[in-house]
Structure formats: structure tokens, C-alpha cells
Image (tube, rainbow, N blue to C red):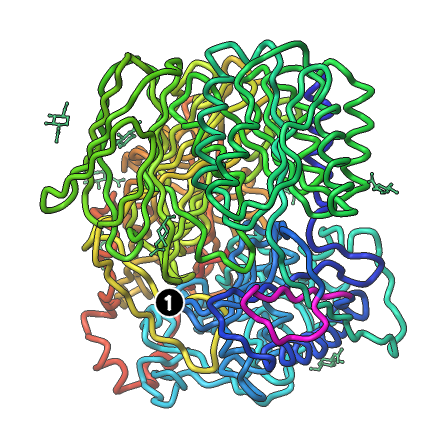
Amino acid sequence: MTLFASLLLSLTICGSIGIKLIGHRYEDVYIVIQNTVAEDPEIIDNIKETFTTASSLLFKATHRRVYFGKINIVIPKEWTNIPNTKQIPSIKLPNFILVDKGQNENPFVKSTECGKEGLYMYLHPSFLLKKGETGYGRKDKVIVHEWGHLRWGLFSEYHSSRKNKFYLDKGRWKPTVCTENIQGRIGIGKFCSTVEEKCQPQNGERRMPSNCNFCPYREQTTNVSIMGYQFVESVNFFCDKDDTSVPVWQRHNHKAPTKQNLLCNGKSAWEVMREHSDFKNGNTPLPDNTNTDPEFVVLKETNAIRVFVLDISGSMNTEDRIGHLYRTSTYIVDSVLPLDSWLGVVCFDEKSKITAQMTKISSDSVRKTLIQSLPSQTAGGTCIGCGITEAINMLNSTFGTAENAEIILMSDGQDGDAGMLASATRLASESHVIIHTVSISQAADPRMIDLAKNSGGKIYTYLDKGSISFAAVFSQVISFSVTEMSAQPETMLFMSVSVPNSAMNFAFKMETDSGLNTTITVLTKLASNAKLTMEVTGPGSTNFKTVDGTSLTYQIPGVLKVNVTSSQATTWDYTVSSMPTGSNQIKSRTRLSQNSFDFNGAPTDMPVVYADITKGYAPVTGVDVFAIVEGAKGLLCNLSLTDDGLGPDQILDDGTYSAFILPVCMENNRLNLRVRISGSKGRARVQIGGSGAIATEEPDITYEDLEDDFQRFSIPEPLFVQNLPNNLNLPPGRITDLSIVHMKTRKTAYGESRNFTIAWTATGGDMNMGKASAYDIRIAEDIDTILNNFTNAQKFEVGNVTLSPKPSGSAEAIRISVNAVESYTGTAFLGIVAIDENQKAGQVSNVVSFLVAKGFRIQVEEVAYYTHGLFDGKTDEVDGMDKKTVNQQPSLVANVLIVFCLVAMLSV
Ligand SMILES: *[C@@H]1O[C@H](CO)[C@@H](O)[C@H](O)[C@H]1NC(C)=O
Ligand SMILES: *[C@@H]1O[C@H](CO)[C@@H](O)[C@H](O)[C@H]1NC(C)=O
Ligand SMILES: *[C@@H]1O[C@H](CO)[C@@H](O)[C@H](O)[C@H]1NC(C)=O
Ligand SMILES: *[C@@H]1O[C@H](CO)[C@@H](O)[C@H](O)[C@H]1NC(C)=O
Ligand SMILES: *[C@@H]1O[C@H](CO)[C@@H](O)[C@H](O)[C@H]1NC(C)=O
Ligand SMILES: *[C@@H]1O[C@H](CO)[C@@H](O)[C@H](O)[C@H]1NC(C)=O
Ligand SMILES: *[C@@H]1O[C@H](CO)[C@@H](O)[C@H](O)[C@H]1NC(C)=O
Ligand SMILES: *[C@@H]1O[C@H](CO)[C@@H](O)[C@H](O)[C@H]1NC(C)=O
């Protein structure tokens, strides 16, 4: 496995593509305007103005360390009146800023994980076109706030959900913010204009009603937490560590249940930033008078330039790979490559040959000519380097450069000419060509991955035995223009059927607003002379019949049934894809947390598969998502991906569905994933508003119901597994939603007695799979003992209550009572850990805390019946009186001898 050494190296250095920090300047920042936005030179002017002021603020906020150096603005082809534009072919970006007219107007970043770069920053044209201040505050502040999400993987420093807008600390409710210095009003309504008794911060014995808000004053003196309320005019800095090394004004509040605390383990913005490569190497401050004005370049994408570099070595005869490649590439040239794009074809065995010079696809007859250059015969050995070098030379001699042209490399073998491969790798990097690779079978040379990743290209695998269709994999590497994201085809279905048959049928669902231009493609495998008859039955018994064809275009929504017969028995490969014709289509995108996973070096995290499902950039919730994991011999696992905010899923209802890929679903070498997404009318819905930058006015969340069922199939890049152990005992998962759902307080002759119900969602015995075998609940007088020294905290007595964990995902709850006779003196923090049958413990949950009296007694009363939402809206009970009665005598709380106070606080 020495080949894998080079593979791993390149997977870790692929940060060279995308936004770069050179010295103190960010270069290669791309702002991409989508073609759904009407041509308007003012958008360009406003981008320049906004990012120039944002650059200066970024410089100030990072204590003079970084600013925007060079910004490329990419405009759509349709924009024709913008002067001084530079033309370049295909732009490939791992992350960027995009301007589009989605359903959400608020700026936001699609985040990944704490400390990792986000996928994109979204800006609506109305935000850029607004003169002066926006509903989210000054534009430069919004940009720097979003930059914190996009570049450094910071999360927001306000409440992570409506349930935790406030947290209890020292007996009082405090707003969920990074700095305690921030001033504002507490009340009801968008501007907290109605001040209500029930929103009293001193009512510590009840939870704060969920309609009470905190509205910071726009004008005040607080200067930190740009990741919090960025619209506060004086806020210019990021929070830093909560200790004496940091001035008091900048200290981070690690107790508040902000997303930043929840997802970054209580770390402040600066603690996360200092671990990022931008600041890790002690980037020293620049002088105050540094010119931070960025340079702007306006770019326009020209038609894509591609070269197919195809392996025709002897091994391509295995399983009729060459025949399959021929039929699939014929389909791609015929139906997938866009009109007016360029194509050249190079074939290689131990040497290389150009079979088609660079040709502009200007008509159907040009397509037919190009198809004749596709290979169908094999010969000789494998020299990948020869093919790449030939392609680059052809590009250079046609266009004078190979920069930003795309090479699509397909091979199934080990390269036999290391010298040639090394020199081709150098040439590729010098000429800035983009190389996408499709590895055919597990035997394909892993060094192809180096080539692709170092050039910013995509990597895919086609396994002869899997259910993933070659046509779908091939289509995946044909990318569309970055300014035409809404026009990218969506795949509804694909399948590779390996049981030979002379008839086959399948059905799929097509939603009304995307089914406008659907292509059904059926290809045969291992049967090169088969003649096909295809019959499509749509709603109202519509019948379409093609004889002796392999592909047809269908344009009616609904459930479609396809019957295909063949003149000879064959295995099959079919795909159904659709070209969206409007801009607010349901889009799916799948990705992995990493492309390679090595069990040597004791990894702590498991790889995660994600599916992002959006409609006009707004999340689609309530969708069924499954990922099929396949290895050399076929199916390994069927995973369910969820958007429940538990386990690997960071945020509830954000349209990102996720699942761990656990060792039981793995084998060494390449794993392919096929993700099936299906939404049904009535259950799936689009959530509009409620995400993104916080506005001065709390936005309303609205829901759009879908008019139809829909389905999608998607293929993320493959996962490379190494050193998979025979048996691995994984620890249980982490509980992240421990909370107090109900409180009941009674004054007794001795002091006070309080009962409350704490609830959480069960995790599993192996991460979030199966069932844990015990819970370890502990309390301590300081939060850091719970977070960092859990096993030394005091064990929670559960008496004779049997607390046996339910299966992962089940609702769990216990009712506990606390009794004390003395007045309040300290704080108790409570955390929970799941333990498996081998006594292996998971990570400590989020923390709930109580302010308690000296000598308090705490005990578990019972395992409580609980289902999600059972206590929602239920008010807490105090001495049998309802809330209103208590609120009419606000002095009551202050006057009684407070035996203990309870802090319902969600910390990390
Ligand atoms: C931020 O505000 C505090 C007072 O609230 C002040 O002491 C401090 O100097 C300010 N920091 C900067 C960098 O202006
Ligand atoms: C491209 O061709 C020119 C001459 O036509 C040559 O000078 C240059 O080195 C070539 N570049 C590459 C990357 O081969
Ligand atoms: C559908 O596709 C066909 C063939 O690609 C094309 O001619 C036609 O214009 C498309 N129709 C729409 C509505 O985009
Ligand atoms: C399609 O095939 C199925 C199963 O072979 C068959 O039951 C059905 O009648 C066929 N439909 C048509 C329209 O031929
Ligand atoms: C995966 O599991 C789901 C739910 O149990 C099921 O509907 C689906 O058919 C399964 N897929 C495969 C390929 O087994
Ligand atoms: C708490 O529960 C215990 C036992 O179930 C009960 O005796 C006590 O009265 C309860 N206290 C309150 C405040 O409800
Ligand atoms: C953990 O707790 C033990 C016992 O209270 C104490 O001796 C030890 O110093 C603590 N360790 C840390 C890292 O705080
Ligand atoms: C144990 O449980 C029983 C009911 O099953 C209860 O009556 C008893 O008080 C409990 N004992 C303790 C110490 O909690």
C-alpha cells in the first residue's frame, strides 16, 4: 500500500485551491453573480464599495492582521455592458460568495464544522443594492460577520434556537450573547416594544417564556461580538478567551447557549481563529496606515474547454469496460455536453494518441463526428502521464494556454511509467489545467487522485459491481458554469443492474416545477449489438415509444413508468435527469466530511455523509434521505440521514441531512455512496426566513408546502479507507440536547423543594448506533469539572430507580427532586455520559446547571414518560399558583428566603 502514501499526502495539501491568504492579503476571493440576476452595473459598484469598507473593518477586527487583497467578480455571460472584463473558461471553486435571487433575503453562510471553511456565502441582490444601512446593519459589518463563518468556521453568538434566547445565571435570566456588557431591552414583539411582567429576568424559578425577546440597543458602547449582533453600531471586534490574559471587555462568555459554544466546545471566536492557518503562524500586525483597499477584477466565463483522456489499455477489456465506456461517452457527447463548449479526445495505452483535435460543439453533426473519435478497441499498457501530456500540449497549441481547461481522465489500471507521470503532474500544475478523474474499479491507480485534487478537480469512482451507473458518474464530472447554478441538471434516478435480462422496467416521481426537460437514458452493458425498445407510461396513460434507441427526452410531470426490452439479454445502466428551467428548483448536493480515512493514528471522529437539500437556498425539511454504501463486492450498508440536530447533524432543520459512516459499513480501499432523496407532499416543506444574519427585526419564519412529491439521486465523491481493524470498539455518542423541560417548586416548612424533569435524546452504544448500556450522571460545583474532569465529579445518586438506556434516538427523561434548608451559596452543574457494554464512555453532554444551597439533596424520583414536544408551552408551577398570580406580586420572589435557585442553563 505504498501508493496510498502519496494519496494521503495530496489529500491533506489540497488547500492550495480556492481562497488563499498571501502574507496578510486574501487572494482569489470570488464573488459570483448568478444569471438569474438582471444586469445592473450598480451591483458591481456596490460590491466594490461594500468590500472595500469590509476590508478595512476586517483589518481592524483582526487587530491589523488580514484584509481583502484581490477580489474577482464573476458576471454571467448575459451581462454584456460591463467594461474591462477578462474572459476565462470554467472556474472551479471550493468556496465562494454568490449573489442570487433565492427565496431567502438574509445574507447567510452554508457552514460545515467548527474551524472548517463553509461552502458558500449567499448575498441577495437587494442587500447589495440597498443604499446605506440594511435591515442587518451596516453592510461591511454583515460581510465581516459572514466572513467569520465562511473562512474560519465560526458560529453565531446569539441563541441557537428559540428555546434558549435566555439562560439562567446566578438566579437571573440573561440574554444569550457573547458579552455580558451588551445592553438592550427585554420584552415581547419584534422590537421588544411590549414589556411584559412574565419576561422578568429575576423570575428564576420559572423558565423564560419563549415569546420573550432580547433586543440590543443599536447605539451603545459595547465593542465586541461581531459574530453576535453585528448591527450594533459600536461592535467591531471578536470575543476572545475567558481568562485574565484577555482584557475584560473582550472576554467570551462560555456559559451562554450560543451556536458557537455548542458547536465549538465553549471556545471563543479568537480561540478558533488562532487555530486556523491564517493566524496559526503568528501573523504579526501591520502598521495602522496600511492601505487595505482590495483590487477588483471582473471576469466572465467563456464556453468550457474539455479534453477526454481515455484509457484503452488491455485491462479495459475486463467486464467489457471499453464497450461500456464507448456507449456512455457517446451518450455524454450526444446529450450532456453543452452547445458551444469545446471538446478534444486523447486515448492512451503505453503511448498516447489524439483522436479528436479541439472542436467547438456547434451543431448535432459536430457531435456525430466527435462520437466517431471515441475508442471502442483496446491495446497495450498504461501510461497516464502520456495521455495528460498529450492533452496539455494540444490545449496549448490550440489556445496558447491550458489554463482553466478541464481534462477528464478515465483509467482502470496502474500506471506503468512513473517518470512520465511525474513530469505530467508537474506540467499540469504549471499550466493550471483542471483534471477530473474517474477511477474505473478498485485496481485504478490511486495517484490519479493526486492529479485531480492538486488541480482543483473532482474525483469519482466507478465499480463494475455496484449499483451506481457509469453514465451518472460521467455526468457528474461535466460541470456547468458557476454563474448558472440554477441550470445544473438534477438527477432523479440512476441504477446499474448487473443481472442480465432481456426486459427491464423502473418507475420514478417527477415534480411539476422541475420536470420540464427530463431525459431518460438506458444503456446496455456486455451486449454491444442489442437493439432496445423503450416504452414510457406517464399520467393519463401517455405513451412514448422509441425503437432501437437508447435515450429519449420526456416532458410531463408525474409518476413515470419505463419498460425496456432488448433483442438480447444484457445488463443495464440507466439514468433519469432533468434540466430545471426556472430558478427556484429543489436542489440536492451530497458531500463527505473527508475523502480519506485511516484507522492508524486512532481517529476520534468518524467520517460523515451530508446531503444539502434546498429550494431557492431555503432549507427543505421533512425529507427521507438514505445513503447506500458500496465496496468492491457491492452493498455494504444502508444509512438513514437525518436533519434532527443530533449525532453528526449539527443544526436541526437547516436542510442538511447527515449520518456517520461507521466501520461496519466499511472495507479497505474505495467506497462509493449513492444517496436517495425523496420528499412527499404534505410532509416535506420549505422553511423560509429564520436562518442567516440576525436582523434588527426578528424575522418571521414561514413555511412553503410542496406541490408535489419529488425524488433525487446523488453521488458524493468516494471515501478511501485504510487499515480498517477487524473489530473496533467505538465509544457511545455524545448527548447534545440535555435540557430542563418542566419545573415545579413548593415551599416547605423547612425551605424549598423543587422537582424538575430533565430530558434528552438517547445516543447509541457505538456512536449513535444501537443502544448504550448505562448512563453516568454527575454534578460538580464548577462547570469546568464537568467539561474537563468528568470522572472526578460527584456521581449522581439514582436511588433504586433503574435507568437503562433506550435505543439511539429515543426520548429519555427523568424527574429529579432537590431539597435544601440553607440559603443559596453555590452552583451545581450536571452532565451526562453514555457508557457501552465494554465500559467505554462517550463524550460529556451539554451541561444543565442549578444554583443550589449548601447541603442540598438531589435524587432521581422516577423515569419520566416523555415524548418530544410534550412539555412545549407548558408553564412551570410554583406552589400551585399559576403564573399570573405570581406576576401580580413581583416582590414575592425577592422577599422569600431563597433556599436555592435553579439555573436552567444549557452550556456546551
Ligand atoms: C472596547 O471598549 C472598552 C470599553 O468598553 C475599551 O476599554 C476598549 O479600549 C475598547 N477596545 C478597543 C480596541 O477600542
Ligand atoms: C505552450 O506553448 C508555447 C509555445 O507555443 C510554449 O512556449 C509554452 O512553454 C507552452 N506551455 C506549456 C505549458 O506547454
Ligand atoms: C428541452 O430539451 C430539448 C433538447 O435538449 C431542447 O431542444 C428544448 O429547448 C428544451 N426545452 C426547454 C423548455 O428547455
Ligand atoms: C411493463 O412491464 C411490467 C412488468 O414486466 C408489465 O407488468 C407491464 O404491463 C408493462 N407495461 C407496459 C405498458 O407494457
Ligand atoms: C434502505 O432502507 C430504506 C428504509 O428502510 C428502504 O426504504 C430502502 O429500500 C433501503 N434501500 C436499499 C437499497 O436497501
Ligand atoms: C417532588 O416529588 C416528590 C416525590 O415524588 C414529592 O413528594 C414532592 O412533593 C414533589 N415536590 C414538588 C415541589 O412537587
Ligand atoms: C480533576 O479532579 C481531581 C480530583 O478532584 C483533581 O485532583 C485534579 O487536579 C483535577 N484535574 C484537572 C485537570 O482539573
Ligand atoms: C424505591 O422504590 C419504591 C417503589 O418502587 C419506593 O416506594 C421507595 O421509596 C424507593 N426507595 C428509595 C430509597 O427511593
Q: Which image quarter holds the N terminus?
A: top right
Q: Is residue 45 left or right of residue 854?
A: right
Q: Is residue 864 left or right of residue 66?
A: left
Residue 852 visible? The answer is no
Whether 90 is drawn above or below 40: the answer is above
Q: Which percent across, then down, holds residue 582?
A: 37, 61
Amino acid carrying mark 1 in the image: Arg
State the extent of the magenta-drawn residues as a range.
70-85
Q: Residue at x 84, y 55 (%)?
A: 282
- Residue placed most toward the observer, 549 or 405: 549
Q: What residue is shown with label 1?
A: 162
Q: Residue furthest left?
A: 540
Q: Which percent across, then down, holds residue 683?
A: 22, 53
Q: Residue furthest front?
A: 365
Q: Residue at x 58, y 61 (%)?
A: 254
Whether 34 is drawn above or below 725: the answer is below
Residue 82 among magenta residues:
yes
Residue 333 visible? The answer is yes
